[in-house]
Amino acid sequence: MTNRWVIFSITIVFSLGLIWVGRQLRKIGNRTDSFETFLPQNLHPAKLPPLPPGAAMANLEVEGRKVVGPLPRNAHGSQRRIVLSNKVSAHWKEDLEKSLTGLAGATLKEIKISKLDSFIWTVSGQSLNVESVLITMENAKGEISKFNALVDSQNGKIIQTWNQPVVDSSNPRENSGVKIDSRYLQN
Amino acid sequence: MIVVSHRMIKPIQKSASLRSALVLAALFALTSCNPTAIDPKSTRDSVVGNNDGSITGAAYIYPESPFILSNDRQGLDDIDIGDYVDAEAAFITANNQLTANCSMSFFFNGVVTDEISNCLRSFGLETESVPLARQPDNTWIYSNGSRKFYQVNTLFHLNKGVNTFFSKLEFAYKKAQSMGTAVPKSIPSYLKDSKMFWFKGVGNLDAQQFQNSFLSSFAYCNFDGNASFSAAGPELCFGSLAAHPNFHFVQDPSVMLHELGHAMGSIMLNLRNGTATGTHPFRSSFGKFGYSEASAINEGFADYFSYVVNKRTHFAEWSLGKTVNQSRPMSERDPAHISAINTTSEGRLSYPQYLLYDPNFPTQPFEDEHYAGQIISHYLVALTENLKSSCSLTSQSDGGHSLATSYVMLLLTETFSEIGDLYARGVDEEYTPSSGAIYFNNLDPSNSFLWSKYVNPATFRRFSQLMAKNIKKYITGSLCGSFDQNKSEKLLDDYGLLLFKTYNNNGNSTKLRSKTYNSVVTDIDALQPLTLVRENNRRKSVLVSKTLIDLSSKVEASTTNPVGVYIIDNRTDIENLLSALLFKGFPVPLSSNVASVDYNNGNIKVSPGEIVGVIPNLYNSSNTTMSGIHILAEDWDHVSYDTLTGKVKPCAFDSDITIDQGGVSNASCTATSTEYTKFTKTTVGTVAPVCLVQLDEGETTRWVSQNEFRVKQGLALQDKDCLGYTSSGVSDVDFTYNPHECLMRFLPGANDAFFSKIDSRETYYESVVKDLRSPQFNVGNLMLMEVNKWVPPGTKFKCRLRVNFSNCSDCHADAAAANDDYQDSDLMGAKPYKILNIDFDIND
């Protein structure tokens, strides 16, 4: 009986010691050695940590399109049914091209819209059918610019743009600015 | 005699007669040997071949620009690039096409290396899509100065830069992961599986993010006087100069590295925006069209990246210096600087004093992100040098450059990836949404793009605060204890960048202070103490109250420049602006039928139907320069929704809208919502458009929402006659438009403005614009506004914009929370801002 208690006690002590060592190892980052001497070859997670879910959180599809973004919830935090705020038009691309051409005016030589993806985007309590596109433009000088856009599938309205080019001109002073009306300068 | 090595014969001096003599001598020597040596000036045909395979996959490259190699003796028009190629051929690539492979090693259960084949592709013209194939002799040798020659050289230099970048990212990843799960970090542990270390989505979502999963470069881009990085390609474009037909930007490796720096910065910003199973629909980037501090950070980092690779503290001597006298230094030691600039605390290139400084024309200050970015590049180089000495790295064979830049790139990677976090999580380990939708960066995943780009963009303040936090965590706390908090803060202050009161490192969430990292990741210690700045380190970084900034027209002292708002309504100017915004990738969604430039009458007033540019002219009443001024016209929480009447009423924040004038002061006005939701036809929002309108009810006038006005004023406007309403062939109903901006609205994508600085007791115009040779505003100063053609002349609007600035003492720190930074959700409300009330009377 006494031997069992001794073994039991040793086991408990040993387990507690292991737990303590584990905690200390997790805090090893507070050491101030240089990286080379410090490199903790043994201190890695035993397995790959679980990956957080992607934007398509629920792997949900509605009317054949995947849902991207947080699922809508009501005031109590319960999940709501997805109600689409718009429909898919066959003419969204034409509508988009028309609006861009109007904006560009005479400087535009060519515009190309390439669809990259279609999905349902949940934002601000709304669920929208959207198209993710690449817009490529060539101006009268033959210069090319491209960027991505999220477009309303119903009316071709641009919701968001990203991946704009970063242009470094040789002389920043020659970048065109915003002219001030001479009537302001007279005051 | 058998020649066994392939070497080029290079003349020692450039004088023509000596050159000729040496060439003749060389040729004579060669004729007595088996002629397998290669003359660099000869055409491709004279190369005998790669018989022994010793130059397989190789070519002759110029290691630096002609400026550097000739010690500034080379002119732009008589250049023979063959004079500058190395004697020994350098390895380019073993691939059969002119592409390079990328690999990144991950420290995990040993070392695992992930390879991406053909990640880098070098082309000549933009019309090319098939990479160049190897020469039949398996070399990449082409005639010196030919297009293909430059393509090969471009790949060499870009590959060198990419390899350097990966070595730094590997270091950063290893270090971050080695800190253990108790330490919150931004570089995600799942980077190998998400593959966000390159321009690559995952699986079939590749197409959602990029046109290609490789980085292309075009050595002969059709772009006069420019070089660029396009994230949508992704691609690098190197142009030329029409005035100098023999000049190409790719002749300058520092320019190639600068543009590559933009590409690598883009990767660092987006490290957190993908997982193994998906990518965020958007992608983070720095800045917008025109001046902003985010753009300046981007430019400063790109300059610094060239230093990381080539160890030189000056950029673009050949491509910018020789051509237009616009090269840029990165150290106060550079002789290009004025004498007042040096490496003492007082002499550093500090913020905001040197925001407009052009070392090439120091008496002509100019607002541009490239000049402002010098403050960042100088700080990063000084930080690198400080780390070399503080951490005893100078005894290393390279003087500590490699390791010190690894330290700084680690800090930058952590900083950028936090700034650009669109999933908004901030930490990863075992975190799932079931923990209660708690986020730590950029508000939440739905609005993170809006937050990181517009509401809370990268500013010098945000950048320097994150750098300080990461220095404390990784350098002081681990890699180099001797670079302590005092040293870090003193260096930041030398550059005027000690713009914060705390390090904002206590890990609270974006919406609730009570929720911290520990709420979702139990490994992270519950107690994350807030580090306070040691105020005795603050000597140059002066903070100013937001009460001291306002529209010039509202400040009596500002009599020399009383213009409150500059209006641009010249039709051609607006058309050109819209076109330029579009080409830069910032198209402004105009309303289809109730506003148009056709109504623009150029009377510098606001008239029905017009699209106008609006530039608020701010006055600084303080004794100190204000800097990084940011005006927002984005929807915000300034109204109260009455559930009984369905009306939206303005909150009475200040004397501009009082209770008697229709304002309310209830619970929903004193507290800021934590969920950002805009009004639509069917949705009650938490934030509302900025412009209210005055409703005349006979004996009283009230400020009301635009929707209430159009009903009560008898305008009889249907939804389709509202601004922002877009009809389509499928259905006439646009459920996404906002009825509260039916009559006047600031256009999305052009609804914020940035100003570099305003000197003491001056307006912005007086500080920055007035003394320009040709006074003009920067595009970044401008917002665009539409006015419905049905608005009756004489209608009065009040637009409640908000302003903050980088060296503001009470815009970012919440005094009610021991000066901890305001939470992201607080940025929906009034507290962190000065409200700018701008009145517009609609002109006939």
Image: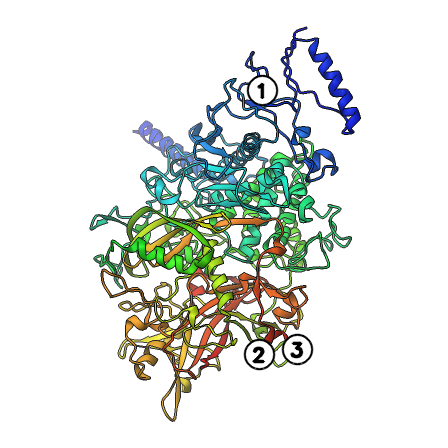
Which tag, 1 or 3, sits closer to the chain's start? 1
Q: Position of residue B770 (x, y in %)?
A: 65, 68
Q: Which residue is mark 3?
A: B560
Few, some or many residues within 10 Å of mark 1 (<14, 14–19, 20+): few
Instruction: Describe the element under mark 3 as helix, strand or loop.
Output: loop
The residue closer to the viewer here, B6 or B425, is B6
Q: Which residue is mark 1?
A: B45
Q: Which marked residue is nearer to the observer: mark 1 or mark 3?
A: 1
Q: Residue at x 54, y 64 (%)?
A: B781
Q: Which residue is mark 2?
A: B553
Which tag, 2 or 3, sits closer to the chain's start? 2
Few, some or many residues within 10 Å of mark 2 (<14, 14–19, 20+): some
- The part of the image, by quadrant, that contains residue B659 is bottom left
Q: Residue at x 25, y 66 (%)?
A: B733
Instruction: Describe the element under mark 2 as helix, strand or loop.
Output: helix
Q: Position of residue B476 (x, y in %)?
A: 59, 44
- Real-space CA distance between mark 2 and mark 1, rounded to the nearest whole angstrom: 73 Å
Q: Do badges 2 and 1 share one subunit?
A: yes
- Real-space CA distance between mark 2 and mark 3, rounded to the nearest whole angstrom: 10 Å
